[in-house]
Amino acid sequence: EDQVTQSPEALRLQEGESSSLNCSYTVSGLRGLFWYRQDPGKGPEFLFTLYSAGEEKEKERLKATLTKKESFLHITAPKPEDSATYLCAVRGGAQKLVFGQGTRLTINP
Amino acid sequence: NAGVTQTPKFRILKIGQSMTLQCTQDMNHNYMYWYRQDPGMGLKLIYYSVGAGITDKGEVPNGYNVSRSTTEDFPLRLELAAPSQTSVYFCASSYPASSGGGEAFFGQGTRLTVV
């Protein structure tokens, strides 16, 4: 059974304080690991796809990395507008897209 | 491009009533998904489809039914609504990962309350 566990559940940072979010996964035949951002009352918004261990993707203050068992979303010098819930998902050989429970990130000015 | 469109946006149902949540995509995606999201939680997969005429169960299928007669449409049917089905429902679609990308695009959600 494909599974995704995210930690921490919630994280509060000061503006400019860098940190990382963790996504641990077990999947049969990884077809992609995905990171999404979700703002309150809205649908998830796609950020990154990673396919193989060692791969990295960057977008503004966010950088996603992948190993064989986990992915990290690094946030560098965050701003208040980076406050959101960040969701991790995996697609395995069965083509299901399975999500973790998310990390609620709050950036205080 | 409208992307993924869900209707209705909000609905209140009485216990035991039935309803259909509509989902349409105009991106010619093969794959479509239905999720529910309870307050403060992640997304749980209800049903998914890899193409017209093909559907399969996700993590929490009980109390729901789906059909996929066209590429564009993937309605979710609730029979005999129960308070435990109070949630926000999201529909999503994607290309297969083998086609490159494979990321899912989401609708804006349907907020359902069962009283």
Image (cartoon, coloured by chain):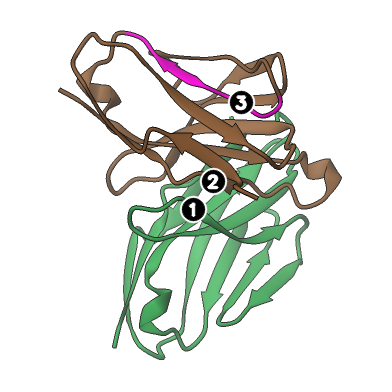
Residue B33 screen position, x and y as percent: 57, 32
Locate residue B74: give its quadrant. top right
Q: Secondary structure at mark 2?
A: strand
Residue B113 screen position, x and y as percent: 23, 30
Q: Circle 2 sits on which residue?
A: B106
The amino acid beneath tag 2 is Phe
Which colour denotes chain B? brown
Residue A18, disc: none
Q: Are marks 2 and 1 in contact (CB under 8 Å)?
A: yes
The one nearer the camera, B109 or A20, is B109
Chain holding disc 2: B
Q: Of label 3 and label 2, which has the lower sequence position?
A: 3
Q: Are marks 3 and 2 in contact (CB under 8 Å)?
A: no
Residue furthest front in the image: B1
Q: Are marks 2 and 1 on the same chain?
A: no
What span is in magenta? B71-79
- Is residue B77 in the magenta section? yes
Residue A44, disc: 1
Task: Tell me what residue is drawn at x 63 percent, y 76 percent.
Answer: A59
Locate residue A17: give its quadrant. bottom left
